[in-house]
Amino acid sequence: MIPGEVEQAMTTLYDTLGVQAHASDDEIKRAYRKAAMKWHPDRNSGAEAVARAAFQEIKDAYAILSDAEQRKVYDAVYAEQMRGWEAQRARQQQAQAQREAAARAADEAAYAEMVSVAIRFADEGHNRDVLFGVLLGRQCEPRRAAQIADSMAALQASRREAAKADAAADAAHSTDANEAAEAAEAARDSDLPAHTKAASVKDAVAHDAPGSRARHAKREEPATDAHPAGTLGGLWFQFLNGLRF
């Protein structure tokens, strides 16, 4: 419905008498008598002006619909008016739909722009309150600004945690490699027999091999710990869902 306009169906003479458009002459006559009695000024003490106006409309409607020729002309004119009214209403509805679609597109574009701004400032290291203030300064609606700022802050926190987990894992692998190299060097420098040195070096190298490290890490990793990459992926999914409105 277009703002400021009231959409209503056209009132017909049939509506005035309270009958259907295909009513018979007898039905029209009975409806007229019933309506005339209801709205006769003598039967509406204290509301004579309203009753008199309604009574006159009822009389005019009956005068046309009780005459076969006049009723035929009225039906033809009314049908033409209805077609024009329906065409006008269809145009209004189409225009309204276009305006609503344009408004939705503009709103989505504005939302995407606010998210882009929040991402840029978050990547620069600013916290949630700064993001919220920046969005308000860009004329972003407060509720939406808070939603975007909260989601972006949560995403940044999850990325930092994932980075810490990756760094810790890399440090652990580096420590294992250094220990294996030191063991191999010690074995070469010892007074052990040659075949024993070779076995020690071989064991140290095997311990430092990628497959061995993977198996070693797999055995030591608790069953309940999720891989950081999986955690980050889940948080990305939650963030993207949270940005919808």
Image (tube, rainbow, N blue to C red):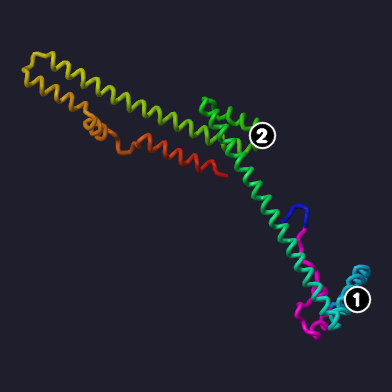
What separation in Å lies between label 1 and label 2 (alpha carbons)? 62 Å
Q: Residues within 10 Å of mark 1 (few under 14, many from 20)?
A: some
Left or right, 206 with respect to 42, comes to left
Q: Which residues are magenta?
A: 6-34
Tell me where residue 118 appears, x and y as whole percent. Answer: 56, 32
Tell me where residue 103 appears, x and y as whole percent. Answer: 66, 46
**Residue type of the residue flagged with mark 1:** His
Q: Is residue 72 above or below residue 85?
A: below
Tell me where residue 58 appears, x and y as whole percent. Answer: 87, 75
Q: Which residue is mark 2?
A: 139
**Residue type of the residue flagged with mark 2:** Gln
Q: Secondary structure at mark 1?
A: loop
Q: Residue at x 76, y 77 (%)?
A: 21
Q: Nearer the viewer, mark 1 or mark 2?
A: 2
In front of the other: 139 or 92: 92
Q: Which residue is mark 1?
A: 40
Mark 1 or mark 2: name the one nearer the start of the chain.
1
State the quadrant of the N terminus: bottom right
In front of the other: 240 or 101: 101
| Count of numbered marks | 2
Tell me where residue 36 appears, x and y as whole percent. Answer: 88, 78
Q: Secondary structure at mark 2?
A: loop
